[in-house]
Image (tube, coloured by chain):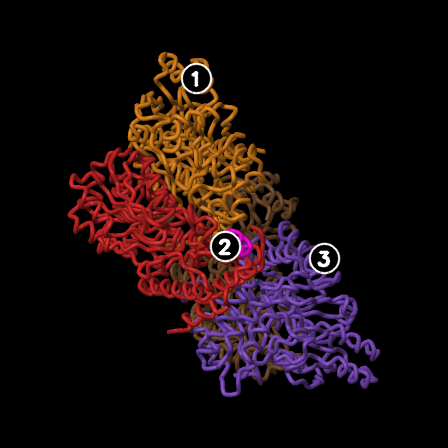
Chain colours: A red, B orange, C purple, D brown
Amino acid sequence: MTYAAGRHFLQIPGPTNVPDPVLRATAAPTIDHRGPEFQALGHELLRDIRPVFGTTNPVVIYPATGTGAWEAALVNTLSPGDAVLTYETGHFATLWQEMARGLGLDVDVLPGDWRHGVDPAAIGERLAADRGHRIRAVCVVHNETSTGVTSRIAEIRAAMDAAGHPALLLVDAISSLGAIDVRHDEWGVDVTVAGSQKGLMLPPGMSFNAISDKALEASRTAGLPRTYWDWGPMLAANDRGFFPYTPNTHLLYGLREVLRLLDEEGLQNVFARHARHAEATRAAVRGWGLEVLCLDEREHSGALTAVLVPANVDADKVRALILDRFDMSLGAGLGRLAGTVFRIGHLGAFNDLTLAGTLAGVQMGLRLSGVPVDPGGLDAALERLQAA
Amino acid sequence: MTYAAGRHFLQIPGPTNVPDPVLRATAAPTIDHRGPEFQALGHELLRDIRPVFGTTNPVVIYPATGTGAWEAALVNTLSPGDAVLTYETGHFATLWQEMARGLGLDVDVLPGDWRHGVDPAAIGERLAADRGHRIRAVCVVHNETSTGVTSRIAEIRAAMDAAGHPALLLVDAISSLGAIDVRHDEWGVDVTVAGSQKGLMLPPGMSFNAISDKALEASRTAGLPRTYWDWGPMLAANDRGFFPYTPNTHLLYGLREVLRLLDEEGLQNVFARHARHAEATRAAVRGWGLEVLCLDEREHSGALTAVLVPANVDADKVRALILDRFDMSLGAGLGRLAGTVFRIGHLGAFNDLTLAGTLAGVQMGLRLSGVPVDPGGLDAALERLQAA
Amino acid sequence: MTYAAGRHFLQIPGPTNVPDPVLRATAAPTIDHRGPEFQALGHELLRDIRPVFGTTNPVVIYPATGTGAWEAALVNTLSPGDAVLTYETGHFATLWQEMARGLGLDVDVLPGDWRHGVDPAAIGERLAADRGHRIRAVCVVHNETSTGVTSRIAEIRAAMDAAGHPALLLVDAISSLGAIDVRHDEWGVDVTVAGSQKGLMLPPGMSFNAISDKALEASRTAGLPRTYWDWGPMLAANDRGFFPYTPNTHLLYGLREVLRLLDEEGLQNVFARHARHAEATRAAVRGWGLEVLCLDEREHSGALTAVLVPANVDADKVRALILDRFDMSLGAGLGRLAGTVFRIGHLGAFNDLTLAGTLAGVQMGLRLSGVPVDPGGLDAALERLQAA
Amino acid sequence: MTYAAGRHFLQIPGPTNVPDPVLRATAAPTIDHRGPEFQALGHELLRDIRPVFGTTNPVVIYPATGTGAWEAALVNTLSPGDAVLTYETGHFATLWQEMARGLGLDVDVLPGDWRHGVDPAAIGERLAADRGHRIRAVCVVHNETSTGVTSRIAEIRAAMDAAGHPALLLVDAISSLGAIDVRHDEWGVDVTVAGSQKGLMLPPGMSFNAISDKALEASRTAGLPRTYWDWGPMLAANDRGFFPYTPNTHLLYGLREVLRLLDEEGLQNVFARHARHAEATRAAVRGWGLEVLCLDEREHSGALTAVLVPANVDADKVRALILDRFDMSLGAGLGRLAGTVFRIGHLGAFNDLTLAGTLAGVQMGLRLSGVPVDPGGLDAALERLQAA
C-alpha cells in the first residue's frame, strides 16, 4: 500500500477502523474447523453474539458480506411471487428492493424523500389495507447508511401490530448493530440482518441473521431455492458448535475479541458514545452553515452524518481534495444523492480526538474547495465534546 | 486458544496453514473499498489471479466460501429444471449434487466407488446417449477432498468433445487450485470453482469462479434467481477494479501476498513439490502395510492422501489420539468413509520436515492405537524426500 | 491492555507511534542470526542506515536504548579522567553529564536557561581558553527533548574549528534523527548518538553510533573499560553482515521497513513535514495565549513543542485530565520544568489530521482545566495546515 | 525475507521460535512508558518474572541482550582488579572470561574439556586454597550453549559453602531459564543472568539479572564504573513500576504473554518436556551411531544437544546442506568445536512432531552428506516420544 505519514483517517460509514487487538486476533493461525478447539469457540460465539442483537434466539453467522445476509433473510422466509412491502429510505433500501425483485418477489415500495426514515403510519395504513394478507414481509432498513437517517423500528412494529397484520418484519441493521441500539426481541423483529464491518469493527466478510421463532417457522415452508443461505443445516450444525461448510475462522477469532471489547465498554456506553459523536458532528455542520441531510430530530443516526454541500459544489470533488490533502476517506453521496452530499462515518472504533481530527479535515477541505464555512463549526463540535 | 507448546500441526486437507507473511498481510488496516488505493489493488488482483487458474478470462472473487462458489457456478449458468450430469467421486461430489437438487435442477448421477476419479468414458457415453441435449452441464470435482483422488479433467473434456455434446463443463477445483495443475482454458472448462483456504494458503472466506466465454454467454439466459452470486454486476464493477458490494478487503491483501509467494516459487515448482510430498506419503502408508484409498496410479492427489485403517480400527479414534498426544489435526473420513479412513493433508504452505513430522505423528499414533505398523514406513518416506 | 474506544493518541515526544506495517514487520518469525538470510539483511541495513545519518561512515547498531548509545559514545572515545565540555540545554543534557561523571570523566558544564540551545560562541570561547587541550570531547544534545529546542550543530562545529581545538564532537541526535535534518559528515560530528523510538518510528530497544574516522582513531587508545559497547568487535563483525553477539533481529526487520518508508516519502519531505507541524503547533499555542518554551526562532524543534502553562496551573494535572478524558498522552515537564510545561510530540508517523486531533485535545483539556485559552488557537493551526 | 514453502525450522539453540501469540503481542501499539497503563504492566511483570527465576528477590530487566546482562552482573558487584574464578566449560564461559578481563578484572580460569560441566570439587578446592579471599566471585555458565552440558549449580554452591568462602556466585542461565530448572534462591545464586530469546521464547533484545541480597549489598561498594547497567536507579524506578530510561515496551508485552503461557503449561511441565525431547534426541544420535558431546549423564542439557561428526566430516558443510535442502538452521560448533560438532536446539516453543521433523532433517542431511547413519536413529527417538 502506498505510504503516507501517519494513519489514514477511514471515516466512511463502513467498513470501519478495525481495532488493533482485533486485527491481531484475526492473524492467529488457522485451526481445524471440525475439531474440539473450534467447537468450543463456536459455542461461545453463537451464545455471546445474541445479546448484541438483543435476542435470546439463534443468530446465524455467514461467511459472506451483508448483501448475502439480505438475500438469506429473503430466501429463508419467502416463496416465489410473495409480496413484500418496503420503504424507500435511501440507496440501500432501494438495493434491497432490487434484490427482492431479482429473486422473483413482488415488491411494494412506499416512496420516501431520502431525508426521513420509514413512516410507521404509512406502513400501518398499507398493511391495514392489505386485508387478504398478500404481503408476507415488511423489509426496512434500520439505519440507512446512504442518508444517516435511523428509522424507528419499535414504532413500525407497533403500527404492524395495530394493523393486525401477520407479515414478517425484516430489518437491515447492517450499519446500526454495535453502534445504535438494536433490540431484536423487544421490537418484535423477525429477521435482523447485520454485517461484521460496521459497528462490530471487524473486517468485512461476515454477516448475520438473527431469527425469531416466527421467521424460523416461516422458513419451514418458504419456497425460494436456497442452499448456501439455508438456516436449516446451519442451525443444526450450530447446535454442536459447528458450521455446515467451512466458516471464516479468522473473522470468528476477531469476533471473539470484539465481543470482549464491547463487553468491556458496555453496550449502552457504546451507543451513548456514538450518539454523542453524532451530536458533535451535527454541531459542526450547523456551525459551518451547512445542512444535515436528515430532517427529523428523532431520526439522526449515531453512526454517520450526511452533509449537503451548496448547490454549486461537487461533493465528490471535496472528498477527492480531502483524500489527497489530508489522507481521509469520506463516504460519497450514493444514487440520487451523488455529488450533493458527502457522508462522515463516526462509528466503530472511534474517539473524541479522532472525531476532532476528522471534523478539522472536513472543515479545511471545504474551505480549500471554496465553500465559505465558518471555522466556528469545529469549535461548536469541541464544545459538545467538552461537555461531560 | 488453548496453549500447547510449539505449533499445532494442521494437516487436514484444508483449511491449510497460512504462511506467516500472509497472516500479517491480512492484518493491515482496512481501506476504503471505493477509493483509488483499493481500485489499484482490485485491478492488480483481478489480473494476476488469472494465470493461477490457467486462464486469460475473468475470474470472479466472492466474499464467501467454496460452497458459495459452487452455488454461483450453478445459478449463473442454469435454469430451473435444467439437467446436469454429475459423477459420484466422493463426499463433496455428493454434496454438490445435493445442492444442485436443492436449487431445483434435475441431477443425473453416474455412480462411483469413492476410490476412483471420474470415468471420462462414462461421461462420454452418457452424453452421447443424450441426443436431445437435455443435459446442460457436467459437474465434476477435480480433486475429491474426501478421497484423495484427482480426476483427469482434460480427458473428460475430450470425451465431451468426442460426444459432440454442448453441455457446459463445471469443475470444482477447490482443493486442487494452487496445489495441482489447473488449466481452465487449455482443458476447456467453463466454470472453475475454487476457494481461498486450500492451495492458496489463505484463511477461508473467499472463493472464485473462473468463467469461459461460453459460460458467460449461458449466464445471459440462465433463469435461476441470483443476486449475491450474479456475475453480471460483478464483472461490470470488476472492470473498474471494484466490486458491486463490500469485498473482503483483508483477504484481498492476503491474496496479493499469496500471488507473490506463488510467483516466487513458480507454479510448476509448487505442483512438483505437492506431487513429491504425496509420493513420500504413499511410500509411508505402504511401508506401514496400510492401503491408500485411491486405486488408480494416474489419479493420486498431490494435495492429500486418504488412508484405510484395518477393519477393526476406528479411524476417528486414531485421529483423536493423535490430536491429544501429538497436537496434530488430520482429516476425518466423510460420509460413507466415516471411521474407515483418515486423511493426511499435505498441501499449501508445507515442506519436507513438516511432512516428516506429520508422518512421524501418524506412525506413532497408529502404533499407540494398536495398529501394528512397520516403522519402515517413515523411513521409506524419508528415502523419497532425500532423492533429488 | 485496557480498552478505550479508538486509538490512543500517543503524543509524547517519543517513543512515537509505530506505523502499522512496521509493527507487522517486527512480528515476523525469528531467523538464525548467523545464517545467510540474516547476513544479507545485515549488509543491507548497515549500508542503508548511513544516509539517514548523513554519513558514508559506519553506523553501529546496538540492542539497547539511547542511554546505552550515550554510554557507548563516551566509553569508546575517552579515558578515565578525561575532560569533556557540555552545555546545559535541558534535562537530557544534564543526564548525559551525570552519566559522564558516573564513568569517571571530568565534566565541564556551560550553564543554560533551558530555553535556548547550545551557544556556539560560548563553546568556542571555552575551547579557545583550553590552550592545553585538556578537553577531549564536546558533548551536546541536538534536539533537547525536554525543551523542544534544537541546537545549531553546524555552528558549534564552526566555533570549534575557529578555536582550532581538537576535541571530538559528540552529538545526541536521539530525538532529531528521522525528524530533523542530521548531517553527521557535513557537520563534522564525531559520534552521532541515536535511538530507534523517535523519528525512526520503531519500538524502543535499538540505538546507534555513527562514527567519524577521528572518533574511530580515538577509540584505539581510549581507556574506559568497554565490552558490550566496544566498536572494535562490532565493526569487525559488521563487515561480514553480522554482529558480535545476538542482535535484536525483530527490530532490524522493522528498521528495514522504516528505511523503505523514509525513502518513499523522501528524507527532505519528512523534515519539511515535521517543521510544518511544529509551525502549526506554535500557531495554536500562541493563539491560545500561551508561551512556547523555546525562545529563539532559529531553534524551534520540528519534533516537539514544550508549552508553558500559567503560573497557577499544574501542567501535570492538565496532562492527567487530557489522558483521562481524551485518551491522549503528552510529555511531562522534566527536571526543573516539572509542572510548569507540558510537551506535545509531533514527530514520527504523524499527519495533519492527527495533529488537528492532538491540538483539539490540548485545547479542550486546557479549557476543562480552567485555563482560559482562546479557541482561535486551533483555528490558527488549521490555517497553517491549510496553506500549501 | 526469501520465501521457502512452509515454515523454516529454526533449531539453533537460541534465539528460538517465538510462539505466534507472543509475536502478535509484541506488535501492539506503543504506550507511554511513563503513564499509568505502563505502570500497571511494569508492576505486574516485575512481580511475575520472579518465580521463573525461582526467587522472591528483585529481577532487573534490561533493554539489551544477554551479553549486556553478563556485563551488568560484573560491573554491579565488582571493583577494578577484583579476582574472579571461572571454569572453562565451553565457548560462552570463555567469552564471559574475556569480558571480565576486558573490564579489568583478574580472572582465574579452571580448565575444562568442553565435554563436562563445572567440577564442583575443583571450585571447592580452589576456593579453599584462597585463604585470603582474594576471589570475589565465581562465574559459571549453567547451561553451556556451545556444548549442551548443564552444570550442577546446587553442587557448586555446596562446594563453596563447604570451603567457607564468601565469594559471590554469578550464574549465566541464558540458555537454561525457561527450559531447565533454575532455582536462584534455593541454590544460593547471587546473580542469575538470563536473556529473552531462549527458553523465554521471546525475540532477542531483553535480558535479566536476578539479584540476591548479598549481591545487592556488594553493589553498594562495587567500584567498576556503571551507568546503563546500574542496579541502583533501576531498582528505585522499578519500585514504582517504571524504568530509569526507556524500556523496550514491546518485548514487555511479549513477556506478559510468555508468562501466561508458562503458567498455563506449568513450569515443571515445561522442564519435563525439554528433558524428554533431549532424551529422544540422544536416542536418535546414538541410534545413528554418532556421539553426543556431553559425557556425563548427570549433565545432559534439556535445551540442546551437541553432536560430534565423524573425523572426516565437516559439520558446517552438513549444516549448510541441511539448510539448503531442508530449510532448517542448526547451531554451528563454536570456538574449538568449529567443524566438529553441530548443535540441535530443542528448547522453547517446541513439540514432539517438530522434534520428529527436526531429527528427520538431521538424519537425511547426514546421509546426504555421506555420513552412514542408521535410519534406526529416528525410530529410536520416536520410541522415546511414544512412551507415556
Measuring from the top left, give residue C229's x and y in whole percent: 66, 69
Chain of the residue where label 1 is placed in the rendered structure: B
Callout 2 secondary element:
strand
Q: Amino acid at mark 2?
A: Ser
Chain of the residue where label 2 is placed in the rendered structure: A
Q: Residue at x 75, y 79 (%)?
A: C120
Q: Is residue A186 visible?
A: yes
Callout 1 secondary element:
helix
Q: Residue at x 30, y 34 (%)?
A: A104
Judging by the rendered image, the residue that carries numbered circle 2 is A329
Judging by the rendered image, the residue that carries numbered circle 1 is B160
Residue C133 left/right relative to B41: right
Q: Main secondary structure of the magenta part?
A: helix
Q: Nearer the viewer, residue C169 or A175?
A: A175
Question: Which of the two marks, 1 or 3, is nearer to us in this view?
Answer: 1
Q: Is residue A36 visible?
A: no
> On residue A186, which mark appears?
none
Q: Residue at x 46, y 16 (%)?
A: B161
